[in-house]
Image: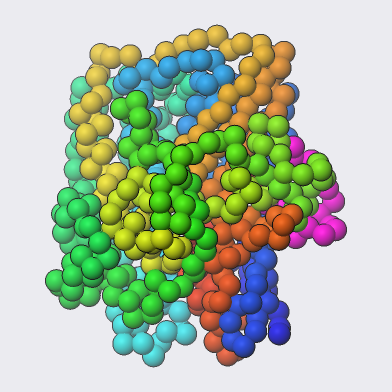
């Protein structure tokens, strides 16, 4: 048996290292290391409650709106405040814009460039993939980056700026939308739809959203040549490499519920456990620090009573990431979890009663682009320029609140406690904290550590391509992981 350390990873937000124990050309076990401690939970202690709207978005420049939404929902819960109807629609549009842009960035700039590595130079599909997706030099970036930039103009209209907007409040958004701006929003989303239907899918969004099974997806892929539409291009490469057999983790998936415009969720809240839906109870979440570099608290703690007390970075731990568990079980979060919980037939068929995999994770994110853009078109029509965009309430001197939402990478939760008008405790569990968590006290690995087991390593590889695909299928955001 031998050990291989992979890292730092390029095209990843923040610092990441993966320690692999190898046996007979495959990964026997893995340790995922988050080496950077940041301490936002400590920074927020003693601050005014509404200061969370300033500090929390600065956890990350990629998913800052998701952090804003979670913070605002925690504050609204503490205040007992209902979000204004038009403000709720505006928040969903702001949040969806960030998440869709994130999905697009992940597909084109983070995931697909790995198929242009020299390790694949002998494959029949390599030349076309390299010309299309090579980082900085591929033709895809010339089309994708302008379309993404145009989509992000929605942020300027609704949120003032991005990232780190201050436009999202507990009761809604800070400004009304005029009728002219509503029309402009519709035009931006329509232009983005045309880009998706021409470049990414080479088909209508409705057709992609309606795919019912893995067989239907394969039949759709084979309708046209592999390079007609970048999604089809991915599917052809995925089949050639067998990505559906790579990166299998556990069978428990969590979604906190995504987007709130209609009083419920566009994508439901719940669990998916070994092929069946199950009810979600947030009180069953606890964080274990047995293998993290924190002062030990005597056992796993629920986030509402959580502690973030850094030790000296030595000892038996191997990461700054805590180990969140649901009723003691490892869970996976992300687009595949959202669509399993929400009941999309394509994703449920791809995963079945087992685990997710590299192919399913990437497909679920691309599918969500179609689903969310179609929803954005409806939300824009639901805006009422003369309606109420923000409601208000006093902040009690002593209160608690929970803010649950879905970032592009998965379930994001903020837990807030206020005493004597100041933040007494603020705990955050980010999506990559779930997926990149270390082993817990019972030795159970996190989702990525489990997914890496069995990954093939070719002779002489120092950055195994299979490991790269598995890691990037989760799209890590390490600055969020230890916030």
Position of 268 relative to 397 (above/below): below
- Residue 253 place in picture, x, y as percent: 48, 51
Q: Main secondary structure of the magenta part?
A: loop
**Quadrant assignment for the N terminus:** bottom right
- Residue 11 place in picture, x, y as percent: 51, 62
In this rendering, would 4 be left or right of 340?
right
**For this rendering, which residue is in front, 209 or 300?**
300
**For this rendering, which residue is in front, 141 or 170?**
170
Position of 340 relative to 243 (above/below): above
**For this rendering, which residue is in front, 67 or 406?**
406
Q: Is residue 362 visible?
A: no
Question: Which residue is pictured at 66% across the width and 24% down the height?
Answer: 417
Question: Which residue is pictured at 66% across the width and 60% down the height?
Answer: 444
Position of 229 relative to 206 (above/below): below
In the rendered structure, which segment of residues is drawn in magenta? Answer: 307-321
Question: Which residue is pictured at 26% across the width and 38% down the height?
Answer: 376
Q: In the image, is residue 311 part of the stretch drawn in magenta?
A: yes
Question: Which residue is pictured at 30% across the width and 27% down the height?
Answer: 262
Question: Which coloring applies here?
Answer: rainbow
- Residue 298 place in picture, x, y as percent: 81, 43
In this rendering, would 238 be left or right of 310?
left
Position of 203 relative to 171 (above/below): below
Q: In the image, is residue 10 part of the stretch drawn in magenta?
A: no
């Amino acid at each position: 048996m031998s050990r291989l350390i992979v890292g730092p990873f390029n095209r990843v937000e923040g610092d990441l290292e993966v320690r692999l124990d190898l046996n007979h050309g495959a990964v026997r076990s893995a340790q995922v290391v988050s080496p950077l401690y940041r301490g936002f939970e400590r920074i927020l202690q003693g601050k005014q409650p509404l200061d969370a709207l300033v500090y929390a978005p600065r956890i990350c420049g990629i998913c800052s709106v998701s952090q804003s939404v979670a913070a605002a929902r925690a504050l609204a819960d503490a205040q007992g405040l209902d979000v204004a109807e038009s403000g709720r629609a505006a928040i969903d549009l702001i949040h969806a814009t960030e998440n869709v842009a994130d999905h697009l960035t992940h597909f084109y700039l983070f995931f697909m460039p790995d198929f242009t590595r020299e390790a694949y130079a002998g494959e029949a599909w390599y030349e076309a993939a390299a010309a299309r997706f090579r980082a900085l030099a591929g033709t895809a970036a010339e089309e994708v980056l302008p379309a993404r930039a145009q989509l992000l103009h929605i942020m300027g209209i609704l949120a003032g700026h991005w990232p780190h907007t201050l436009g999202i409040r507990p009761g809604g958004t800070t400004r009304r939308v005029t009728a002219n701006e509503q029309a402009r929003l519709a035009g931006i989303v329509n232009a983005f739809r045309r880009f998706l239907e021409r470049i990414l899918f080479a088909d209508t969004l409705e057709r992609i959203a309606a795919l019912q099974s893995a067989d239907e997806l394969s039949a759709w892929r084979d309708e046209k040549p592999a390079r007609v539409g970048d999604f089809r291009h991915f599917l052809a490469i995925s089949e050639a490499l067998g990505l559906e057999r790579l990166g299998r983790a556990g069978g428990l998936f969590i979604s906190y519920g995504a987007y709130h415009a209609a009083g419920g969720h566009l994508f439901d809240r719940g669990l998916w456990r070994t092929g069946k839906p199950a009810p979600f109870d947030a009180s069953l979440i606890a964080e274990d620090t047995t293998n993290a570099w924190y002062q030990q608290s005597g056992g796993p703690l629920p986030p509402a009573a959580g502690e973030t007390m850094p030790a000296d970075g030595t000892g038996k731990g191997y990461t700054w990431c805590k180990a969140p568990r649901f009723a003691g079980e490892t869970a996976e979060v992300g687009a595949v979890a959202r669509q399993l919980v929400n009941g999309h037939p394509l994703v449920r068929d791809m995963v079945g009663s087992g685990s997710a995999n590299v192919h399913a994770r990437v497909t679920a994110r691309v599918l969500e682009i179609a689903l969310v853009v179609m929803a954005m078109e409806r939300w824009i029509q639901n805006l009422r320029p003369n309606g109420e965009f923000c409601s208000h309430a006093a902040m009690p001197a002593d209160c608690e609140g929970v803010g649950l939402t879905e970032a592009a990478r998965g379930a994001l939760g903020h837990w807030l406690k206020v005493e004597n008008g100041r933040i007494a405790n603020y705990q955050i569990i980010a999506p990559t904290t779930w997926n990149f968590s270390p082993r817990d006290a019972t030795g159970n690995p996190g989702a990525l550590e489990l997914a890496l087991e069995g990954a093939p390593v070719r002779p002489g590889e120092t950055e195994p391509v299979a490991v790269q695909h598995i890691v990037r299928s989760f799209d890590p955001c390490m600055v969020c992981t230890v916030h």
